[in-house]
Amino acid sequence: MSGKRKKLPRVALVGRRNVGKSTLLNALYGRRRAITDDTPGLTRDILEVEIERGPYHFVLCDTPGLDIEDPNELEATVLKRARDFIASVDLTLFLLEAPAPAAFDYDFLALLRSSGSKAPVAFAVNKIDGASHAAEGLAEFFEMGLLNATPISARGRWNLEALLESMAEQAPSLRRGNGAPLRSHAKGQRKDDSTVFPERNAEETRIAIVGRPNAGKSSLFNRLAGKDLSIVSEVPGTTRDTVDTILTYQGRQARIVDTAGLRRTAKLREEKARVDFFSTTRTRRAIHDARVVIHVLDATAGVTDFDKKISAMVNEMRRPAILAVNKWDALPNKNQKTMSEYRDRLEFLFPHARRFPVVFCSALSGQRIGDLLEAAFDLDQRMRLRIPTAELNNRVQNWFRGAPGTRAGLKILYATQPETEPPVFALFVNRRKDFRPNLSAYIENRLRKEYKLDGIPLRLYVRESGADRK
């Protein structure tokens, strides 16, 4: 199910922990995409972003810091995946830090030279504050044999064009071919950390995968992406940043985002609070920016109070959601009633999500993954509904005449749809106090049934109009 997008050269950004790789990625990308902080080791997954800057067009891949001594099981997995990944790219960008190379830098340089990889290597020395400090900052690296290293300041965004030119000299495919037009930013477009989904094709379906730690989000993401971009581990909280990719499924394009596992507020005050703060903030933003949310539940662990909090947050942000009951293949003692009984329990625990699609799936085996994507595309399409005002008025008036328990003299003067994606409806009545909640629910249910809006977080407002008021 991997995307059939144009083949772009890929660049692996490598180096020690906390050397500034994520800051450099953000600087080249033009907005904050990777988490940056003084805490070493924030990046665990391989983050891919498409760089379109002047004549250069390529995919930049931020890798974890590789200078981990005596790694534990999870860290060993991180290192192996990163090293395997480096062997597959078109260019390796080795980032070092002034004022001098560390022991790891010598070891890693020797590894690159002895690995037999055909990919060229470009070198950059970070944290050099301007041209006046370049000679001094590069002196130790000249002695290391890096005569073509480019001095830069990722934080200050200094000398980045020279870096790109140096990279393109090593890998000419990074330059746009055939005079392709540059993609310009729209006037007034924000280039800060205002969005998780980069501005891309307006027709793509933006899907955020959320859930509590260890529910199987990264496994599901990798299954959908068709490649291991997110680390899969039994250690809760492995994913710290959001990771995204584009896929094409049956001619339709989607951008899928794997988010960090949302944690209880108490957890944010405990272990690694700063890392969890960044992760949770970006996860919330991923939900906000998504068109559809896949809320992953662990079938073997059951539904927890925290799952209910996540569902409430998705509902609060008014995003269409799918409940993906993952690990369904691992649930023991299933029978013909197991699925319906599980669905009944979900509807009891998530009152506001009773209309959400439920897909019983397995990221491990691929069971019903196609159904999950079909449900996501279907929700996105139905969320775009726009009902002509004349049609809406006629239907609402007809429904109202047959509504039970209406008070004498109560009238719906007119109805309109002021918003879509998701749809919002407004009813203007002559006496608001007589328009009871059961009438609102009745009209909402008729809208859902007539226009197939189950799973869509529509809103219905009732307003009193001065016209025809009695």
Image: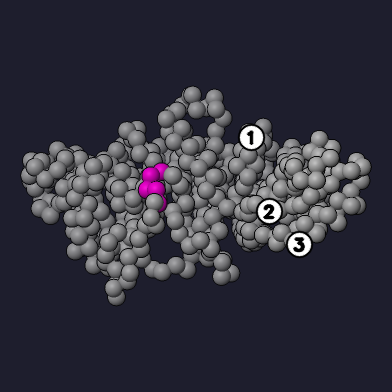
- Which residue is identified by label 1? 309
- 309 is within the stretch colored magenta: no
Q: Residues within 10 Å of mark 1 (few under 14, many from 20)?
A: some
> Crowding at label 3, few (<14), some or many (≥20) Cα neighbours within 10 Å?
few
Residue at numbered disc 2: 417
Q: Earlier in the sequence, mark 2 or mark 1?
A: 1
- On screen, residue 64 versus residue 119, left or right, reads right
CA gap between label 3 and label 2 equals 11 Å
Q: Range of the magenta residues?
A: 189-193
At which x and y percent is residue 409? 89, 43
User: How far across and how far down the image is residue 112, in percent?
Assistant: 23, 54
Q: Amino acid at mark 2?
A: Gln
Give the label, 2 or 1, closer to the camera. 2
Q: Where, quadrant-wise, is the N terminus in this rendering?
A: bottom right
Query: Which residue is at a point 65% across and 52% down the rendered structure image?
Result: 418
Residue tagged 3: 391
Q: Earlier in the sequence, mark 1 or mark 3?
A: 1
Judged by its main secondary structure, the magenta piece is: loop
Count neighbours of disc 2 (C-alpha within 10 A) and say few if under 14, some if 14 to 19, many if 20 or more.
some
Question: Is the residue under label 3 in contact with that under label 1 (CB below 8 Å)?
Answer: no
Query: Residue drawn at (65%, 56%), measured in percent from left and top?
Result: 383
